[in-house]
Image (cartoon, rainbow, N blue to C red):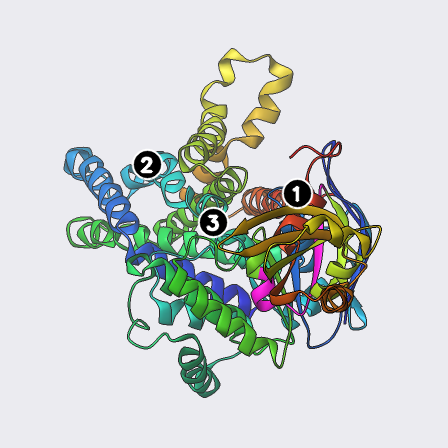
Amino acid sequence: MNTIRLIYRKEMSTYFNSAVAYITLIIFLLINGWFFTSSFFLVGQSDLRILFNSVPLVFIFFIPAITMGSLARENHAGTMEFLTTLPVDDYQIVLGKFFSAVALIGVGLLFTLPHFITLLFVGTSPDIGAILCGYLGLLLVGAMYASIGIFGSAVSNNQITSFLLSFIVIFALYLFDKILIFVPPFLSGILQFLSTDYHFSNISRGVIDSRNIIYFLSVIFFFLTLSVRVLEIRKWR
Amino acid sequence: MIKVEHLTKHYGHVKAVDDISFHVRDGEILGFLGPHGAGKSTTLRIMTSYLTPTSGNIYINDLNVLDDSLDIRKIIGYLPENNPLYPEMNVYDFLKFSAAARKIEGKAFENRLKEVSEMCGLHGVIHKQISELSKGYKQRTGLAQAIFHDPEILILDEPTTGLDPNQIVEIRNLIKQLGKEKTVVISSHILQEIQATADRMVIINKGKIAANGTIDELMSSFKGFTRLHLEIEGVMNARDLTDIHEKIKLADSQTLNGMTKVVIEYPNTLDLRKDVFQYAVKKGWTLLEMNRHRISLEDMFRILTVEEGGKA
């Protein structure tokens, strides 16, 4: 566990010692802020539905940008050889990097709290429970995208390739329940179940269903396991 | 004691290492010599658990790389080829990170940091960012990382590549000093590098071992020629020298200012200096100079690692 924390801390200091964290955070907040303020006062509803609609969309770009370097840079610079010949397990490297990406996403979400505070001031008896559920849902979506981003970063030593690969997978998962009318009926149930938005929209309405939680956790588990397997390819005989 | 046993590594259809076996004794500096692409780095990467062998195994003390990878990594210090470092970190943070991964933290870290920066000459750069360091200081940082946990075994893959001559001498001295108490495996494609640091060497070519032994052993097992340079007062017939032994060949002779300079060649298995001297005495020659040149190790390395068929 200590080793995971060690990798996590190294990763966090890399984020905040370079411009990556600041630039992506600023862009993330600007876009969400623009979406929110441009319609919040027009809709006249006491909830954060606008935010909960825009954040998962912005995440599709924001998260691959955060994670694209995490393993690809180590592969590229050869530091992966240094890291994996320390007494550190491959899964500890992947988890450390995953948690640091989730933490950065958490920081991003924390900075959207002013929207929530605005709502408390101007709204009329907002449903606080539903809003907290929404934030939990956003964190789950973010963590799930981060696991996909880590996988995209593991398979390449080029950050652009990593970005595009994770972007495509994330975008596909986002798109699945938007294209249901175009697919044959026997597929639509499966596609809907695979889609991120379907599970997120339940949570953001304030309904915590174990099926939705299990969906996010199992996708995270799947991609993180896959990433560890990718690191182990070098050990193939 | 490191025992490499029947080690083979394939990359797809390419055999990088082909059934090699050798031992590294405790406390010795073993030079691992071979041209580029001979399989040096692959072998060292298997030793450090970065790669897994296709077949065969490496035993270190009573551990082996297939079953005890994590425990082996704890007792090994490794400087990979090209010395990969995190450019955005400073030296202190980098050493702190690698030490923490080996569970050296707090007071123990600070104490050891003083020792290591003394040994590696890192004073004045501890708080500099790695990307700002010169190549020599980067190499010292990599070496500091490798020795920080005072490992039993030190594995250095081409540690002096790309350094200038002064830096090379410094790193060599450091390696020799470390070799006094540790088992060191050092790889290089440059013979002088190994000659300057190692007690024993293993020469590898195309994934196979071409030679294995101390420098003296390799020299004597190598069927080369000795060249004997002679300078004799007066003018004489150099051909007479071939009477001493049937294996002697006259390579060169010239007369200059009343002196005869002769070069003769004979196999390394013979030492005919005494016979030559006594022959000269018998003939009444005044021998002014006698100088022995053995075919250099450099030549031997070239001969051992050339393509089959004899052409380089």
Residue A42 vs residue B245, the one in the foreground: B245
- Same subunit, labels 1 and 3: the answer reads yes
Residue B230 vs residue B311, the one in the foreground: B230
How far is disc 1 from disc 3 in space, using C-alphas?
15 Å
Number of other residues with Cα within 10 Å of mark 3, as a class: few under 14, some 14 to 19, many 20 or more: many
**Could you tell me which residue is drawn at 33 percent across and 57 percent down?**
B88
Q: Is residue B93 magenta?
A: no
Q: Residues in magenta? A: B194-206
Question: What chain is tagged by disc 1?
Answer: A
Position in image of residue A179 (x %, y %): 47, 18
Position in image of residue B176 (x %, y %): 55, 74
Quadrant position of the N terminus of chain B in the picture? bottom right
Q: Which mark is residue A218?
A: none
Image: B27 above or below B155? below
Quadrant position of the C terminus of chain B in the picture? top right
Q: Amino acid at mark 2?
A: Val
Number of other residues with Cα within 10 Å of mark 1, as a class: few under 14, some 14 to 19, many 20 or more: few
- Same subunit, labels 2 and 3: the answer reads yes
Front disc: 1 or 2:
1
Q: Locate residue B202: give its quadrant.
A: bottom right
- Reading the image, the residue beneath label 2 is A58
- Same subunit, labels 1 and 2: the answer reads yes
Front disc: 2 or 3:
3
Position in image of residue A157 (x %, y %): 48, 39
Question: Element under label 2?
Answer: helix
Taking the image as shown, residue B50 lies to the left or right of residue A151, namely: right
Residue B249 vs residue A145, the one in the foreground: B249
- Reading the image, the residue beneath label 3 is A74
Position in image of residue B109 (x %, y %): 46, 82
